[in-house]
Structure formats: C-alpha cells, structure tokens
Image (cartoon, helix red, strand yellow):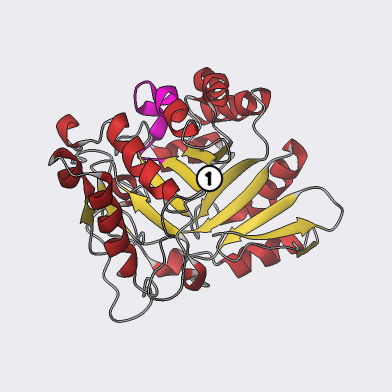
Amino acid sequence: MPSRAHLVDTHGRTVRDLRISVTDRCNLRCTYCMPAEGMPWLPHEQILTYEEIVRIARVAVECGVTGVRLTGGEPTVRRELATLVRQLRALSPALDLSITTNGIKLAEMAAELREAGLSRVNISLDTLVRERFVQIARRDRLADVLMGIDAARRAGFAPIKINTVLMRGFNDDEIVSLAGWARDEGLELRFIEWMPLDFQQKWDREKLVSAAETHDAIHAVYPLEPEEGDDPSAPARPWRYCDGKGRVGFVGSVSNPFCGSCDRIRLTADGQVRTCLFALKEWDFRALLRGGADDGAIEQLMRDAVLRKQPGHLIGQAEFRQPERGMSSIGG
C-alpha cells in the first residue's frame, strides 16, 4: 500500500507506471533506433547502480506506482539483471514487474528472470523474414529471438506480447502474416507506430503505417471486435479476434495519441526522470542520490517533475521538437 500521497500532475493524471532503463547499450543496431556505428555510450560511472535504481523505485511505489517495466537499450545485456528483478520484487508482491527486450538472451535468461520474480515479458520483433531482420537490425539474430520466445513460454510467462514497429515499404506487407503467426503461436501481437525517436533524426512521416490502417488490414482477413474493459491509460488499444483466437493491440502514438490518459514516467540509465518520451526537460535524480539526499528529497523532486508533465507530445504540430536523445538512451 502507498505510504505517501499519489503522484498527480496538473492535468489530473495519476502516475502508476515507472519505466526504468537499466542500460543504453544494445546487441542490435536497428535502423529506426540508432546508427550502425559511433553510438555515444554512457560511461559506466554515470549509470545508476542497482541500489540507486531500487531506492528511486521504492519511493515511487510508496507514492502509488503499481507497475515497473525494465527497458534499455537492451536490458538483458546488463550484468546480473536477475539481481535487480529480485530487489524490485521485494518492494511489493503485487508489483506488476515486466521487461521489454529484443529476446536474444532470453534462451539463457528466461527461467532465471521468472524465478527472480519477473511478471511479464514484451519481446520486440519486426519481421519473420531472416534477410529483412538482418537488414533492419544489422545482425543475423532472428533465430535467437524465436528461441527466446520459446524459452519465455517454457518459463511460464503469459501472456507473451510481441512488439512490432511497421515502416511503409519495408515490412508493412507482413501485417497479416505476422498476425497469423502470432495467432497460431498463442502470442499477443502489438503493432507500434514508428515514432520520431531515432538518433539520426531521419524519421519520415511518409513511412508511418497508422494503427487504423494496420487494424483494417488484419480485420479484412481475421475479423476483429473491440476488447471490453479497455484500460484507457494503456498504450495499446486491444482488439480480440471474433473466432476467439487471442488478441491484437495497436499503439497509435502518432496518429491517435493517448497523452490525455498517460500514467507513465521514465528513469533513464543515467538517473534522469523524464515525464514523456518526447520531453525536452529531464530531472536529475543521480545528482540527488549521490549528494546524500534523503527519501523526502527524492519524493519532492519526483513530485516537481510530475507537476510539470506536459499535456501532450505535440507530434505533427509546429512546436514539436525531437529530443536529442534517441529511444535507446531514453528507455522505451
């Protein structure tokens, strides 16, 4: 139970979800996220320790946060990740503790993460075609991802969600085949609109495949109906297959943003809190922690950040400015 007042912004939104990036490093180099070479990795001493991460998370949980998601970069490349999972699980047995991963290391880690207390996994996969996977990720690791999905299933994770980013002219012809594959495998596919969060800042709206377009392509082959009891603060709008064979979700971050019900804040690997993926301001918790601050000061800075959470991300408007950090540095 929260022992402190909830985190509420000036627009009446209550923060329930904390996304924690444990590293900015990754074992892939996806074209929509980062360049092939020359990434400005954070120095080791700037990365939060597990103890520092857990301390911030504990204050957040005491302020009513009920969900923590580990992200990156690729979170599984951080050493001894199961140790952090155990420490976070100890904060509350009811905590919804999840991870977003590319799945490459799950074959060796899924069982340990499950035993440590991880609740759920989201696995990123943009294509089922090996040559395309190599083209987009710049690594030949599709087989490893598929083995990771199998390992997550054997470890008992359910549901297993698959995150797919579509780009027009690249993988949009796989919409229906990906949906069919996920249905057959008992996986919950989530199509995510491509967002302007690449380090190269080469996002092109003309390559955006909207959530509505993706929905219609699937509905024409596998009829869909709205999922009842939809959580308005969840990024994905869920639909269920009329034949009862699972669900599929659509994240319309660009074409149909859900900013009005957003309940998330993000902690970067170097200890900065961001109240939106597209925020231009960060709040320095690392300096506070390493300066000897008590929990009251941590809570106050968290409240200051949340109170200044903007009403929306402004994509498509003249005022929009893409953050200097890319997605892998912010944490998804």
The quarter of the picture where residue 303 lies is bottom left
Q: Residue at x 44, y 34 (%)?
A: 88
Whether residue 16 is visible to the viewer of this picture, yes or no, is: yes
The location of residue 275, given as percent across then percent down, is 34, 61
Q: Is residue 280 magenta?
A: no
Q: Is residue 82 magenta?
A: yes
The segment highlighted magenta reads 71-84
Q: Is residue 286 above or below residue 211?
A: above
Residue carrying label 1: 126
The quarter of the picture where residue 304 lies is bottom left
Task: Check disc 1: other Cα within 10 Å, few if <14, some if 14-19, many if 20+.
Answer: many
The location of residue 250, given as percent across then percent down, is 60, 60
Foreground pick, 7 / 98: 7
Q: Is residue 153 above or below residue 100?
A: above
Instruction: Check the image and name the residue furthest to the right.
Output: 243
Foreground pick, 91 / 174: 91
Q: Residue at x 34, y 27 (%)?
A: 78
Q: Residue at x 45, y 29 (%)?
A: 85
The location of residue 120, given as percent across then percent down, is 58, 37
Whether residue 332 is visible to the viewer of this picture, yes or no, is: no
Foreground pick, 88 / 272: 88
Q: Is residue 233 above or below residue 164?
A: below
